Amino acid sequence: MEPLAPLPNFKIISPLVARLLAGNPGPFTMQGTNIYLIGCNDSRIMIDVGEGLDCFKDTFNTFIKQNNIKHISHIILTHSHHDHVAGLQSLLSDPNLANIFHNTIVYKIPTDTKHINNLTEAQKYAEIQVTIQIKTTVGHTKDHLCLYLHEENAFFSGDSVLGQNYSPVFENLRIFINSLTSNLNFLADKRSAVLYPSHGPVVENAYEAISKLIEHRNKRDCQIIECLRKAGGLAVLEIVDIIYKDYPESVKPAAANSIVQHLEKLIDENRVEKSGEKFLLVEIKEKL
């Protein structure tokens, strides 16, 4: 795994975008969850909210005071994982932040949660002198979205693409790859777009980053097939021990989930079959 690049607690990374760390570094959150503030006046759009940790509130308060930010008009939640949404009520109900979050509109997709508004694939709106387009990107979770900031040709990837390394966490790999391919097509005429991930540093070329992730997942398919070809049949944890032999034990439970998703995709494609706890290659026989 690539060593993690150090990131400051907050940084203005472009004329319209600031990044704040949620204060929750860890094996899966890396340097911590990136929280973004979009805009250039005293009102901003906030992308994700973190876990509600006091250290993030300190970072947030310091940043808004230094930059004369008076109001968060909208919060857009990229998806419902704990490190992205758990701090919502903590922020909205904090009496010290009442003016900042006064009448803030909260968005995510899709949801039955009261007081949270739904977003749709086609929604495109201008707020605070910026134009943001929503791109539904399911597969990592059922409610995952990405965002495209037109004014800066910037793509906010949520957890679909990280700033470093590759996330082994997704709910449905086949759907995830389809979503990534859709985003790749969306960016086909925006090849210079920068990528702002929810974890890790800025990536200078969003199109290349998504292409590399799709290629990585295809290579993982090939690795699994090669393992099965050599062994004749393997259980999930046996495959994990082979492919992730140089990784720390702490990442192997998530790696096992990743391998399961790859195997399910390969079964759907009629390339692998399951026999008990073992997975085997499907023999391709010439039809007579």
Image (cartoon, rainbow, N blue to C red):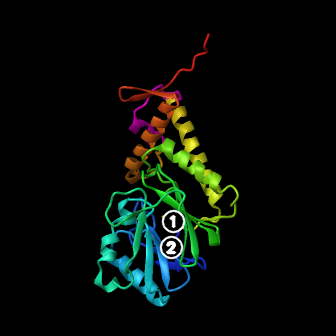
Q: Which amino acid, mark 1?
A: Gly
Q: Which amino acid, mark 2?
A: Leu
Q: Position of residue 280 (x, y in %)?
A: 46, 26
Q: Which residue is mark 2?
A: 7
For the C terminus, give its image quadrant: top right
| Residue, far top | 288
Decide: marks 2, 1 in contact (CB < 8 A)? yes
Q: Position of residue 278 (x, y in %)?
A: 40, 28
Looking at the image, which residue is at 42% across and 52% down?
Answer: 141
Q: Which residue is mark 1?
A: 200
Q: Which residues are magenta?
A: 229-243
Left or right of residue 247, residue 286 in this image: right
Looking at the image, which residue is at 31% across and 86% down?
Answer: 96
Q: Nearer the viewer, residue 278 or 81?
A: 81
Q: Nearer the viewer, residue 62 or 151?
A: 151
Q: Nearer the viewer, residue 198 or 248?
A: 198
Q: Position of residue 31 (x, y in %)?
A: 45, 67
Determine the secondary structure under disc 2. Answer: loop
Looking at the image, can residue 1 be seen?
Answer: no
Q: Where, by quadrant of the figure, is residue 226 drawn?
A: top right
Say if 221 sits above or below 60 in the image.
Answer: above
Is 233 part of what is drawn in magenta? yes
Few, some or many residues within 10 Å of mark 1 (<14, 14–19, 20+): many
